[in-house]
Amino acid sequence: MVERFWKTAISKVEPNKILVRGYNLMELVGKYSYSDLTYLLWKGELPSPNQSRMMDALLTVCLEHSLNAPSVDATIFVASSGVPLQTAVSAGVAAIGEWHGGAIEQAAKILQDGIAHMKDAQLSSGEVAEEILRERSERKERIPGYGHPTHTNDPRTKKLLEIVKETHIAGPHVELAQKIEALTEKFFHKHLILNVDGSIAAIISDMGFDWRIGKGFFIVSRTPGLIAHAYEQMYQNKPYKAPEWNEIAYTGPPEREVPK
Amino acid sequence: MVERFWKTAISKVEPNKILVRGYNLMELVGKYSYSDLTYLLWKGELPSPNQSRMMDALLTVCLEHSLNAPSVDATIFVASSGVPLQTAVSAGVAAIGEWHGGAIEQAAKILQDGIAHMKDAQLSSGEVAEEILRERSERKERIPGYGHPTHTNDPRTKKLLEIVKETHIAGPHVELAQKIEALTEKFFHKHLILNVDGSIAAIISDMGFDWRIGKGFFIVSRTPGLIAHAYEQMYQNKPYKAPEWNEIAYTGPPEREVPK
Amino acid sequence: MVERFWKTAISKVEPNKILVRGYNLMELVGKYSYSDLTYLLWKGELPSPNQSRMMDALLTVCLEHSLNAPSVDATIFVASSGVPLQTAVSAGVAAIGEWHGGAIEQAAKILQDGIAHMKDAQLSSGEVAEEILRERSERKERIPGYGHPTHTNDPRTKKLLEIVKETHIAGPHVELAQKIEALTEKFFHKHLILNVDGSIAAIISDMGFDWRIGKGFFIVSRTPGLIAHAYEQMYQNKPYKAPEWNEIAYTGPPEREVPK
Amino acid sequence: MVERFWKTAISKVEPNKILVRGYNLMELVGKYSYSDLTYLLWKGELPSPNQSRMMDALLTVCLEHSLNAPSVDATIFVASSGVPLQTAVSAGVAAIGEWHGGAIEQAAKILQDGIAHMKDAQLSSGEVAEEILRERSERKERIPGYGHPTHTNDPRTKKLLEIVKETHIAGPHVELAQKIEALTEKFFHKHLILNVDGSIAAIISDMGFDWRIGKGFFIVSRTPGLIAHAYEQMYQNKPYKAPEWNEIAYTGPPEREVPK
């Protein structure tokens, strides 16, 4: 059979009807929340009440981090140049890279590989945590999802861990993430806190999400803020944001003659 | 006083604390939904229960429209080229242009200007609707927010109008939007349905949103779907999506000699 | 006849052959320059030697403007977040908006409309210049392509005007642009220099380009620099560029209680 | 010494003067070509006449590949949605990913590592070529820069190899790239041609470019074409390009009841 050029398992449009993962979207609206429907889009099924509550916390806990985030900075420079709102937001989404939200995916991969290995090799979570940290410290690599430049005790982690317990979602990945935190000092000579990226990584792993959709959580949670920042720059600040020429340190070669 | 280069009224970060519009984000998470916090980011205040319910419907009713949308198509082509998830999503957000979600802003501006004019000139909503339609039809311009190429009766409009009534949010802008629909046949020689863009435009106007943030509603509602489509293309389809050379019709000049 | 979904007049690929506007690309490479082929892509014909020289000057004269440009700033913030090179460059291109390179299109439209009107109404270029300036000053609008925040005498304009004369390309649009400059003081109470955007606008108009491709000149000329800045940020600077939390002025409401 | 937030070695702006890598840009324009100045931006020095000729060929040889490229397809879908020109071009640039131009960087890394290893271990280029191919075939990985889905004999490679010889730029990397091609059949059971990505990779390596700027060559060479395609879609085609709902194959679950 020839494969169709245009195909998708996500949704289906017909005149006057839209199906999402098999459900009529109009029967979901008003009954299931935005976070529920995000869950449906990504997992293919509707969440239970506990999963719904957890999902909403995951999508709100890292809602905003002011201009102390390259995605927001990119957004406001683009917004200042005279473009439509969505163009500025698009640049902010593009900036959700490996060092900015990307630790969710990296940490979720480590945790998911770790739990698979724990089961295969019949190890304890403490043993797996030691293996992960030893390997990282020997390769002189940071451990994604741990440590934070601003927060000494990430308030978002605390909140997420509360809710993951209340909702009975905490499972082996959350346990492993906490074991790793407890052992960071032994391998890295200082205590590295489980940060928001690491706690999201652990929870989405216990919820059964593929680590490769990890950045999706960060993108959705930051998008309303990117919109707010673009709007503020476009309509409440002066256009053409850029440092003045004399605020920029030039570190290149001194002026020289063009060859004859 | 010198204005600071970096400034914002949206949020504030301190070590171990994040304020959003004055509220400690950690006291909001688990208590207010994603849609509530989007409302807070854009309006500066938390919603009432009715506003919360309306907001959630606004952000879910146009969740998905399959590949029958340039934003999704842009996303899957970019996703097929070997890039991170957020890059593909970013391209989809960039495609939410004047002909794709943009009618929300255009229609909201018309409705907000119309209601302001109605009050100034002490007109009825029917009179304003006639003025708006007459002007458009004389300039031979389409009326944004009305008509749809696929849906003869946009199911999303029906759902939104139900909820706007239940929540007692319907006000003069919704009334004007419906008056316009009722009169389209008179001016455009066929009945043009109030579509999802037009109904969102009317409702956000009755909720007190500036028309210039209209596209924000569409961006937020489509982002989880753009993520799902990017993921599907990246991990479930073949890389490098493009039509074959022999599927492309060439309409340029025939082969010619390069000048000596 | 049914229109094909995939069609273009620009180029045609067959196995082992690529035609661009009818020419075999391999017969052009090594014989025609990058600027020549850009001309071919946009105009459909190869340039004469004078047009070639002019084109190259147009595409190099605004090559770089350091970090004093939102496009470069957007590029470096995105580059700092851990993304591939092209993602950062893409954000820079997105920032080439109405206030940043966009004056080329705006000014070219004014000049092209002006010359069309001059011919229709049998006016002199001085009369048209007066009309344009009067209309702008009455509407209290700036005149795009004139004035510069950093340069009191834009060196790029001087260079372009030299080359447009040498190549005998200067025509009515360049003349009109200069007439407008000479009259700015009369209408705006200070002399506004013809800036690089305005001079590019005039020259491309005399070369027969549609004003709507004006931003293309700026995009092409800035792209190598965006790549250089992305590379510098990615490989020579520290990752995650953003102001520290305590460098950001917060102008929103003071901390307040979350409602019960 | 405190590091300045805004700093760059690339260029410096002062009132009425712009320095690029130490040269006054206005003394370069009209004397050095666009390709020369791209070389200056990326290498920090002006090219010799042979380097200039080679650079121009590198930046033109993969100018266009019609709609048979995800970057162009992404561009036209975004362009069809009602956005400014640069937004559509930006999406095309974002699509220059690992499977679309990205082989330049991958191949250049392999070649640069290979030549470094050849010198360290005092091997012949044939021995290094064998090692590279053996490793790839054992890991069942494709060798980037070899093979093409459309071209059985990439005309762009032939043209580049002609010019690299004429300009006396061909060195060990080009030799290694050709040795690898000659041995592909031995390891992959079919002859894989050196494609345009592979030949660009070899040549820029012999020119002394860091492999990590490889995608820059592809981005610059495709940008004028992305602009041409965006313009064609915006001004010569119908808006809102997307497949119709009934052209899309839906592969998800059948319609189902929303749970009570």
Image (tube, coloured by chain):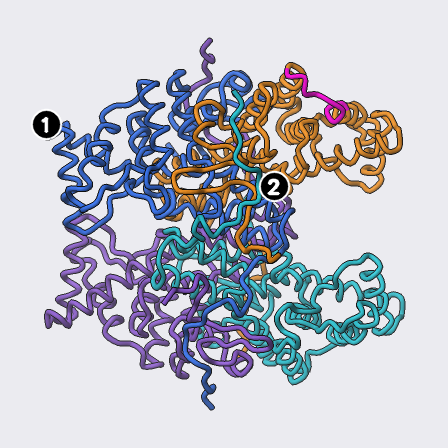
Chain colours: A cyan, B purple, C blue, D orange
Residue A125, image x, y percentages: 83, 73
Residue drawn at x 39%, y 48% is D81
Tag 1: amino acid: Gln
User: Alpha carbon of mark 2 to alpha carbon of mark 1: how far?
Assistant: 56 Å
Q: Give the residue number, with chain letter if any, for mark 1.
A: C122
Residue drawn at x 65%, y 85% is A166
Q: Is residue A16 left or right of residue A165?
A: left
Residue A191, image x, y percentages: 76, 73
- The subunit carrying tag 1 is C
Q: From the viewer's perspective, is residue B92 above or below residue D17?
A: below
Q: Helix, strand, or loop for circle 2? A: loop
- The subunit carrying tag 2 is B
Q: From the viewer's perspective, is residue D62 above or below residue D73?
A: above
Residue drawn at x 58%, y 48% is B79
Residue stretch rendered in magenta on the structure: D167-175
The label number, if any, that marks residue B240 in the structure image: 2
